[in-house]
């Protein structure tokens, strides 16, 4: 009980000595820069970074889909295979989006940029899954 009382007194003295008194409020205010606006985080990315990344990903997806679909596919359940591969690609993309969100890299200024990036990544991963499925020979 004596130690608790002594702890409360030390905490109270610490608060008083830290400058909560009225005489030091202006110096604290100046040292904390309340009058200045907070500095914005400078982004070193170019103005069209999202569009450039989305374009590259779409070109890679188109190349992958061209390689997959240039020859007839030897699958009996063609529709079912495309649906399953699409769902796997969407699942992988959602995992990538979650990781980007956790890393605080999944933010966009406009809805157009969000849709462009998200759709291009989804199409890319669907093409990767289809390429892996049909061209690897493991599943056929």
Image: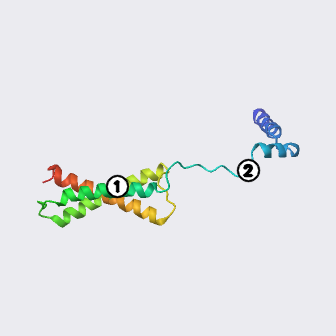
Numbered badge on residue 36: 2
Q: Which residue is mark 1?
A: 57
Which residue appears at 26% of the width and 54% of the height? 128
Which residue appears at 52% of the width and 61% of the height? 109
Q: Dot 2, crowdedness within 10 Å: few (<14), some or many (≥20)?
A: few
Q: Are marks 1 and 2 in contact (CB under 8 Å)?
A: no
**Front residue of 22 and 71:** 71
**Front residue of 130 and 58:** 58
Q: Dot 1, crowdedness within 10 Å: few (<14), some or many (≥20)?
A: many
Image coords of residue 108 (percent x, y): 49, 59
Separation (CA) of disc 1 from disc 2:
42 Å
Q: In the rendered image, which quarter contains the N terminus?
A: top right
Residue most toward the right? 23
Under circle 1, the secondary element is helix
Image coords of residue 139 (percent x, y): 15, 52
Under circle 2, the secondary element is loop
Task: Tell how many labels.
Answer: 2
Residue 43, above or below 5: below
């Amino acid at each position: 009980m004596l130690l608790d009382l002594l702890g409360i007194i030390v905490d109270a003295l610490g608060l008083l000595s830290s400058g909560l008194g009225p005489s030091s409020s202006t110096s604290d205010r100046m040292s904390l820069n309340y009058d200045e606006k907070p500095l914005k985080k400078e982004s070193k990315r170019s103005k069209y970074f999202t569009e450039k990344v989305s374009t590259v990903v779409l070109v890679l997806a188109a190349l992958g889909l061209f390689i997959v679909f240039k020859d007839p596919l030897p699958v009996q359940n063609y529709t079912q295979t495309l649906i399953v591969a699409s769902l796997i690609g969407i699942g992988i993309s959602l995992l990538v989006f979650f990781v980007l969100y956790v890393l605080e890299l999944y933010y966009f200024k406009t809805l157009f940029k969000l849709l462009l990036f998200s759709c291009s990544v989804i199409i890319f991963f669907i093409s990767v899954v289809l390429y892996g499925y049909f061209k690897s020979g493991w599943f056929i």
